[in-house]
Image (spheres, rainbow, N blue to C red):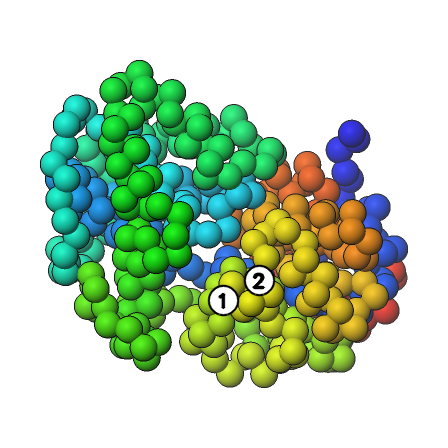
Amino acid sequence: MNKPSYRVLGEGILVSTKSLEELGDLDAIIFDCDGTLIDVEESYYLTTRLTVSIILREIYGMEVKLGRDVNQVIKLLKMLGGFNDDVNTASIIAQTILAFSPKEHVRRGKLNRVDISIFLEDVSRDRSWPEFVSDALQWIMNKCLELYGRYATREDLENILDGIASSKGREEMLSDFRNNICDGSPSNMLSRLFNEIFDGEEMIKKLGEEPRYVRWNGAIRNDKLLIQEETLRDLSEMFNGRLGILSGRRRWEAEYALNDLLKYFDSRAMIFSDDPSWCEKPDPMGLIRCSRLLDSSRILYVGDSSEDLLMVKNALEKGLNSSMASVLTNDFSLNYFIEMGADIIVEDVNLLPKALSGRPWSPFKLP
């Protein structure tokens, strides 16, 4: 396959030369949320580090400190296409640390109410500790780089990790984790802890439950907007209000973070992971349904990770006229998006109006 060629349409904007003509026919746009509309490094990434730290200390008696270097591991996992669910990311990080642990036998503790403040300082450090944790994180990064450009899921990495666990005599630890901590049910311990850390006590109660493990404000408060209102206003005018959302985030989380900005989106064309019609990316059915709700004949999907681009390609195979605008909020995404032929690549989501307007091939003009 020939490597796609790109034209520079301004600082921070690349457009595939093959796609130039087709992009002029776009009539609607659908957005991902995390990493596209919302910066989640201090919310979801922080939740991942806290969740893994708490499980390893409280259940397995391991004194580990997971620093901000874990964020790079998370970003690489996101480029495999099968880690749209952050609980799967936390699971594979925890399992790898268990496999690399020097302890042959560890205590099997019980997770009770934890004090988040005890862990916050540890997960705010730059580097993880001790050395075997760094080794485990490096193994994940190396494996992700080996798989770079190929689709891989948590189960795929678990199958590879089984060999490491077997050679180190850690099969029982991983089996215990998979059967008792993260058993695949929506209410398993890992998922419950993760959601309580992210949601916070107030929201958990609003959802009709009592926090089981954590009482604090919630990492969701650290969400930061990447998209500017001016950008959405321009795009809404360019596309006559035909803006939608397709995101693995839960609906209330999007409402919390985006707040008044949701008025720029068609309320009928917003699909989230807690909706009955949700299909895990890169399954294209959500994109197809969202496109139909917008009555679009050629849709543009805006996302930041490999499952987003894979979903668009899968939708194309199903007959949906769809294009991909890739936002470079992941340090490892540029080469992937170029190699895989994303139609538009922008350094900042707020460059989209410029990328779609004022060009000879485009019918769009900035208001």
Q: Nearer the viewer, residue 33 or 156?
A: 156
Q: Nearer the viewer, residue 172 or 66?
A: 172
Three-letter amino acid code of the residue under disc 1: Asp
Percent x, y for residue 24? 85, 62
Report whether 25 appears left or right of 34: right
Which residue does the numbered mark 1 point to in the structure image?
Answer: 274
Q: In the image, what residue occupies the spot 20% across and 56% down? A: 120
Q: Image quadrant of residue 167?
A: top left
Which residue does the numbered mark 2 point to in the structure image?
Answer: 278
Q: In the image, what residue occupies the spot 29% across and 26% down? A: 171
Q: Image quadrant of residue 200?
A: bottom left
Disc 2 crowd rating (10 Å Cα; few below 14, some 14-19, many 20+) is: some
Q: Nearer the viewer, residue 297 or 276?
A: 276
Three-letter amino acid code of the residue under disc 2: Trp
Percent x, y for residue 219? 31, 64
Report whether 66 appears left or right of 237: left
Percent x, y for residue 294? 74, 73
Q: In the image, what residue occupies the spot 24% across and 72% down? A: 210
Percent x, y for residue 215? 19, 68
In the image, residue 312 sits, relative to residue 29, either above or below, namely: above
Report whether 227 appears left or right of 342: left
Marks 1 and 2 sit apart, C-alpha to C-alpha, by 7 Å
Tag 1 and tag 2, C-beta contact below 8 Å: yes
